[in-house]
Image: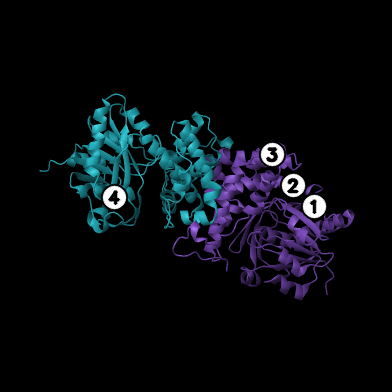
Chain colours: A cyan, B purple
Amino acid sequence: MTTKPKVLLVGMGGVGTIVAYGIQYTGKADVTAVVRSDYDTLTTQGFDLESVDYGNVKGFRPTNVYKSVDDAVSKHGPFDYVVFSMKNTPDIQPIEPLIEKCYHEGIGIVLMQNGYGIHKSVLKKFPTAYVISGVSMISSTLYGRVIKHVGQDAVKVGVCDNGKLDYAKQEQKCKDFIDLYSNDKNDIVYDEDVNYSRWRKLVYNATVNSTAALTNVDIGRLELFGGIDSIVRPAMKEILAIAKSDGVDLPESIIDFMIRSDDGEWYPPSMLIDIRKGNYTEYQVIVGNALDVAKQNNVPAPTLTVLYNLLHVIQWRTMEAKGRFVLPEKRPLPEDNFHIEFK
Amino acid sequence: MTTKPKVLLVGMGGVGTIVAYGIQYTGKADVTAVVRSDYDTLTTQGFDLESVDYGNVKGFRPTNVYKSVDDAVSKHGPFDYVVFSMKNTPDIQPIEPLIEKCYHEGIGIVLMQNGYGIHKSVLKKFPTAYVISGVSMISSTLYGRVIKHVGQDAVKVGVCDNGKLDYAKQEQKCKDFIDLYSNDKNDIVYDEDVNYSRWRKLVYNATVNSTAALTNVDIGRLELFGGIDSIVRPAMKEILAIAKSDGVDLPESIIDFMIRSDDGEWYPPSMLIDIRKGNYTEYQVIVGNALDVAKQNNVPAPTLTVLYNLLHVIQWRTMEAKGRFVLPEKRPLPEDNFHIEFK
């Protein structure tokens, strides 16, 4: 019987798979993964990794794989950590109900997800929880059962202070997680100001991601076709202004740094991949949450506002395509007082 | 041998086909159509019309059909009028070279096309030409070889004064065209202020069209999914402000009138159809030309600017998809000084 710490990992996509592999690579923890659509593939064949960090790996699978958090908890719980590396779509699939299924005092909840301010709803529901924020700068995508991992697994990990428990204890919980995960290939560092890192990442995600998704071109084409200068740069300036209003002072130079961060690759950003696959996008936590801060602090953000509103319509189109609701054959008009009913 | 006036019509899509049918319906003119991709279909089977004006018509074809303006002119020229009902994409296919092939002193050039200020480039090239502006409010789309014509053929026709010829002569040329085209089913009227009508139409086209195209939903879904309120209304307000700076005072009430103009139908606007078919869009004349006026008159138009810039990237994506250029396998970077070369 193992005495290793137990990590529950929810979501085996481009990010989650590399996190799982990175933890198993250290040998310091057992990883139990929860996956839904890829369950059969993962349990029979595993995933193949073409990884800039770990090289070519055939048929990787985590120690344990289950279809649901319930199953994982009843077979292998309680867990020391639950890592959320699934997509962050609170409008579609909020994570709090999943946390509820594995929660106990002392579990570390690691949010290895995109977006700004994503810990707020977790701490609201679990006020004394250890919440850990992981800001990943990885470039990694799952195509079928192949992980194409082209940008190093670099993660900044920090504490989302719950204000209830001793901060040193929360910090220790966070650093213990880093110890399980950090190895000679990846770059996992403790981050005293994870809020800064989240805004920093948003400079890329809220702008390049959104624009690539809306125009259906990778970042290379986006640059050649004029979109970087006409849309991404103004949108990045808006993020910098919003961050500043939130007390985070990012240097102007971050704009060119981010624009050049995928150089050498045509690279399709994650939100573009989502759109191409017909999946939901993380527009709410990536753009919407930033706009909430803009509104609160009266910072103008005209470019991001249009991008957000377009992505919102597309999210609803995706809901319809996925059968979340069915519209009547005859178009309802305002006077019909029609409301969309979810299945 | 006929002595009827001869009309050359370039472009047999949803608009052009109904114009051709409307003119032949009056029996007052012969129509020679120029089509490219649908040439075989049109000459062998013709188009079927499901028309709100003319009912169900099987196998309609214009009197003469040719693949090029050159062919049409050599077989049936000179023409009394040339009607452009093809898509208006000056960035892809400018019309001036086509006018050149059929031009003679006295020909009436009818621009039955979308956009604002589209006569300017024509008059620049042909300063003493009779240029006639046709602002169509039709709803009609070509699917395969079937025209689905759901909104009446209503056109405002007016003079684009060349400032060289006697205005009364230009007016007569315009009214003579209306006489050939107007019948008991359609609603073709002389318009003293065609600039007003063009701005008025832009209230719809620059906003509903663009937003539907970018989100890939029809106007019914656009409304249900929130896009009418979040994007279309602000964009419409910007058009009203730009028009005002151009001396055209449109009433606020036009906003709700336009939003409700497709009621009863889910209706996919023309630019959405273009996108769905993988075709070029008329973003340049519909949104770009309006933004040129905004810039000139210092009118802020943040929403339209983002819509335009996104559509611009998509136009280039379409050019690539249509093989207008080929990008290298390795992504070029700014220091490579790479320029796209058109075939």
* Three-letter amino acid code at the position of disc 3: Ala
Q: Secondary structure at mark 1?
A: strand
Q: Say which element carries label 3.
A: helix
Q: CA distance from mark 4 to mark 2?
A: 59 Å
Q: Is residue A50 above or below residue B252?
A: below
| C-alpha gap between disc 3 and disc 2 | 15 Å
Q: CA distance from mark 1 to mark 4?
A: 65 Å
Which residue is more in the foreground, B229 or A192? A192
Q: Position of residue B46 (x, y in %)?
A: 65, 68
Q: Which residue lies under the disc numbered 4?
A: A18
Instruction: Report the residue marked by disc 2.
Output: B197
Name the chain under label 2: B
Instruction: Give the foreground label among 4 and 2.
Output: 4
Q: Where does residue B37 sit, x and y in percent of width and height?
A: 61, 68
The residue labelled by disc 3 is: B241
Question: Are dots 3 and 4 in contact, CB under 8 Å?
Answer: no
